């Protein structure tokens, strides 16, 4: 495997906010705690506090959740046990419960978390570091998770279920399995034998990443939600998050950065089976949108004390909830996630919670052997492929530049030969001069025709190369987007069972470079 690293800016695929963050622009310094580096984690370790009772609650919740996993990988079981130790910390990434893992960047996030733990274990051997996948089980945007793209075809799951997707049954997914071009045992077993999408997703991540010790956590748990009670109370009575996040967002806008998310007056949902709807305050009452459910102030605060699991944080409060229930040091997200985390620092300060090291997940371009051969045949380097198609064609044309095809030299040589023949004819039989002249003209015409045919053949050859270039570009950048935002894991692991291992070996979580993996 040939590995090439390039700057994120060279890809043209990342926002200016991300590029400024990676270049450590002073403008963004006030909006995060520590820039990700191995050395920065020393101070983060000292700042993060997490009590033994919090560890016991987390451990108990994980034991309950992993009861649905048969034959737990020893590495996962060990990491769950290590969370009880005061010197154990987590590195967390989160993502929706996309069926069949969705786009490739789901896998990239997890591998970044795994590799970060590996780096930190070497740097701080007296501590333990556990990679955690935060399962976005309470998300209700089903349209974002119900499909995936495999070998150029879109597969979709149809269901009428409503509410938090983690609570969905897996009914209907057997139809998707039946449509696939071949059997995929990991997904077959997970979707056929799990009661809910949350259980199935945990089974899948366990099968794919269990050897790496990945722990998958579902925040939709009554015991874990108790940590959210003080946040719910302040949210209902003071609307604290809206005020603070709005202030931070305005500051970012003044600096020319566009906020990624927008705060609501109350950043909470009401959660029940089949229902996840926003809570709004109307005339002193707390109403659940699109329902007849409402609470007085006293009833809402009592509910927060007795049943905090019925409240669900939205995108603004979910990061805070994560940090309340995990001994976490860093959060790993995609470009959009990093940007919206920059809007949250004041909120964390208000609750006295350490703001985690904010890390951009690894990104990559995987070029299989076939596409690598096509690229080499076209005389291109991997970095060339990030140009838009028109610019790439110009670049390619410059590489193929040849002098204009002309047979003028040959024409002159033949003309000289026929002139000599004409002189000889003049001496022998002057009546043959016209015949020689006619033959000379025929030869000149033939050369002219050959010249045109050769030029046309070259143009056809270039046109064929352009078509090959367009095909290669579409294969590596489907829909003119990064491969990782479109293609599914199975597109690559089907033909390369060592795909995940190859990514783990290639990705450096703290290097902040885009990785190109090229099969040789």
Image (spheres, grey):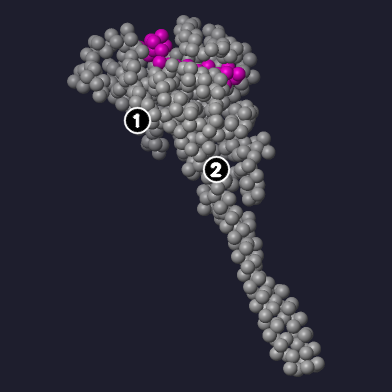
For residue 85, which quarter of the picture? top right
- Please state the extent of the stretch shown in magenta in the rendering: 209-229
Number of the label disc, if any, that sits on residue 262: 1
- Relative height, residue 226 to residue 279 (above, below): above
The residue drawn where x is 53% and y is 45% is 474
Mark found first going from the N terminus, 1 or 2: 1
| Front-most of residues 169 and 358 | 169
For residue 70, which quarter of the picture? top right
Question: Which residue extends farthest left?
Answer: 283
Percent from the top left, x then y, of residue 484?
52, 35
Q: Is residue 222 a member of the stretch shown in magenta?
A: yes
The mark closer to the camera, 1 or 2, is 2
Number of the label disc, if any, that sits on residue 320: none
- Relative height, residue 83 to residue 206 (above, below): above
Q: Is residue 187 a member of the stretch shown in magenta?
A: no
Q: Which residue is mark 2?
A: 475
Give the SS element for disc 2: helix
Give the SS element for disc 1: loop
- Relative height, residue 161 to residue 476 (above, below): above
Give the side of residue 88 with respect to residue 270, left or right. right
The residue drawn where x is 74% and y is 93% is 431
């Amino acid at each position: 495997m040939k590995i090439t690293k390039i700057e994120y800016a060279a890809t043209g695929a990342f926002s200016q906010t991300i590029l400024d963050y990676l270049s450590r622009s002073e403008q963004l310094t006030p909006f995060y705690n520590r820039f990700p580096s191995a050395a920065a984690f020393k101070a983060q370790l000292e700042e993060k506090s997490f009590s033994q009772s919090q560890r016991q609650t987390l451990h108990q919740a994980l034991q309950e959740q992993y009861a649905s996993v048969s034959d737990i990988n020893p590495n996962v079981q060990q990491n769950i046990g290590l969370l009880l130790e005061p010197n154990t910390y987590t590195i967390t990434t989160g993502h929706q419960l996309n069926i069949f893992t969705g786009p490739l960047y789901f896998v990239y996030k997890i591998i970044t978390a795994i590799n970060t733990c590996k780096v930190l274990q070497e740097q701080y051997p007296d501590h333990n570091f556990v990679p955690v996948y935060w399962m976005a089980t309470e998300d209700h945007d089903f349209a974002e998770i119900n499909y995936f793209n495999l070998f150029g075809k879109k597969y979709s799951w149809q269901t009428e279920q409503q509410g938090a997707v983690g609570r969905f049954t897996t009914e209907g997914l057997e139809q998707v399995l039946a449509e696939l071009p071949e059997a995929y045992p990991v997904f077959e077993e997970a979707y056929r034998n799990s009661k809910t999408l949350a259980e199935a997703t945990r089974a899948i991540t366990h099968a794919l990443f269990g050897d790496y010790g990945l722990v998958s956590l579902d925040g939709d748990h009554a015991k874990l939600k108790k940590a959210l009670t003080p946040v719910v109370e302040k949210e209902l009575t003071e609307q604290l998050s809206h005020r603070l996040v709005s202030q931070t967002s305005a500051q970012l806008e003044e600096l020319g950065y566009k906020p990624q998310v927008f705060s609501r007056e109350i950043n909470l949902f009401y959660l029940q089976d089949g229902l996840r709807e926003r809570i709004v305050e109307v005339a002193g009452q707390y109403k659940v949108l699109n329902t007849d459910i409402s609470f007085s102030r006293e009833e809402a605060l009592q509910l927060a004390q007795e049943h905090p699991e019925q409240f669900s944080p939205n995108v603004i409060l979910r990061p805070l909830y994560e940090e309340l229930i995990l001994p976490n040091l860093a959060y790993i997200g995609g470009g959009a996630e990093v940007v919206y985390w920059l809007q949250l620092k004041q909120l964390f300060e208000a609750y006295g919670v350490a703001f985690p090291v904010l890390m951009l997940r690894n990104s990559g371009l995987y070029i299989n052997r076939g596409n690598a051969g096509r690229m080499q045949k076209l005389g291109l380097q991997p970095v060339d492929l990030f140009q838009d198609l028109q610019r790439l064609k110009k670049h390619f044309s410059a590489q193929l530049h040849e002098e204009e095809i002309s047979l003028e030299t040959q024409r002159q040589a033949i003309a000289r030969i026929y002139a000599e023949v004409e002189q000889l004819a003049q001496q022998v039989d002057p009546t043959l001069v016209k015949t020689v002249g006619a033959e000379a003209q025929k030869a000149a015409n033939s050369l002219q025709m050959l010249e045109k045919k050769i030029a046309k053949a070259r143009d056809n050859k270039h046109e064929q190369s352009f078509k090959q270039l367009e095909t290669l570009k579409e294969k590596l950048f489907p829909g003119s987007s990064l491969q990782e935002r479109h293609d599914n894991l199975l597109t690559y692991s089907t033909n390369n069972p060592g795909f995940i291992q190859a990514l783990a070996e290639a990705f450096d979580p703290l290097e902040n470079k885009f990785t190109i993996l090229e099969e040789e």
